[in-house]
Amino acid sequence: MNHLSGSRKKFLSAGAILGFTFALAGHAQSSPETPGQATFQRTCSGCHSITVVTSRRLTRAGWENVVDTMVSRGAQATPDELQQIVSYLTANLGVDSPVPKNAEPGEASVPAPRQSAPVLDTSQIARAKELIQTNGCLSCHRVDGNGSYAGPYLGDIGANHTAEQIHASLVSPSKELTPQNRSVQLVTQDGTTVVGKLLNQDGFSVQVIDASGNLLSFEKANLRDFTIITANSMPSYAHKMAPEDLSLITKYLGSLTSTTLQ
């Protein structure tokens, strides 16, 4: 782990916040408390609740990479605490970790078999990136170190979605945003409007991350308006892109399986 000796004060990115914290949702609530679990909850739950279950499993090296990314973007913990978190993640969400005995029926405890990532040549990759750029995808999404934090991170979409799911999201996107992808529009007392992805809220405050990756917190008492945006603004590309281009971009997104959060 190249960066676990210290932490740098930067804003957390949406990818880092969501990809890392949601991973412990089911396990953090069902397994006996350990030093790693307690440290994880203390370090990461200050900005968002741990309520979403994911089936993602990584090797120890993979979790070290995720924790490194968290540290580089502002996570505050000592080297020993970070090692505890990695050990806890590996034990509970490692590739060989057991299924929790008290897992609820239907809970995504064991990942589905992954399909082999598509292999594209250099010209196909260049064309796919061009399609992403020219079709405005980066105005909402982030991939390959570029784009916005407003929508879901696409850099590892192939690790968690099948080609059929990716294609469906392009041609027939859901009308409603999932809770973890919802945005909010806030209006402060001085009339400033802020739009960002909702990370967490309680009766007194709300935390969001804006399109540039800045983590922002507001006291609700100081807001003139607070609106949660549940409608999905993503358009259908069924008639906006040629079938061969849709096929190519689906294959390209399916090839993105990196555990590095950008």
Image (tube, rainbow, N blue to C red):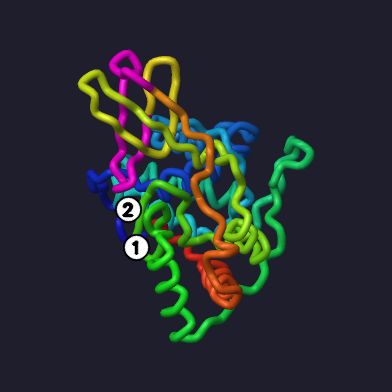
Q: Position of residue 104 (x, y in %)?
A: 75, 36
Q: Amino acid at mark 1?
A: Gly
Q: Is residue 245 above or below residue 42?
A: below
Q: Is residue 68 left or right of residue 172?
A: left
Circle 1 packing at 10 Å, graded few (<14), some (14-19), many (20+), is: few
At a point 60% along the width and 52% down the height, the residue shown is 173
Answer with the quarter of the image where residue 251 lies: bottom right
Q: Is residue 203 magenta?
A: no
Q: Position of residue 204 (x, y in %)?
A: 38, 16
- For marks 1 and 2 on the same chain, the one whose residue lies earlier in the sequence: 2
Q: What residue is drawn where x is 35% and y is 58%?
A: 147
Residue 207 lies left or right of residue 119; in this view the side is left
Q: Quadrant of the C terminus?
A: bottom left
Residue occupying the point 38% across, 25% down: 206
**Callout in the foreground (1, 2):** 1
SS under mark 2 = loop
| 212 up-or-down from 260: above or below | above
Query: Mark 2: few, some, or many residues within 10 Å (few <14, many ≥20)?
Result: many
223 in the magenta segment? yes
Marking on residue 85:
none
Quadrant of the image containing the N terminus: bottom left
Rendered location of residue 26, percent (x, y): 62, 38
Residue 17 falls in which quadrant of the image? Answer: top left
Question: In this figure, which residue is indicated by the disc labeled 1?
Answer: 145
Q: Which mark is residue 4?
A: 2
Q: In the rendering, at what x and y percent does residue 199 appear?
A: 43, 35
Q: Which residues are magenta?
A: 207-225
Residue beneath the point at 51% across and 50% down:
234
Label 2 sits on what residue type?
Leu
Could you say which is closer to the camera, residue 213 or residue 133? 133
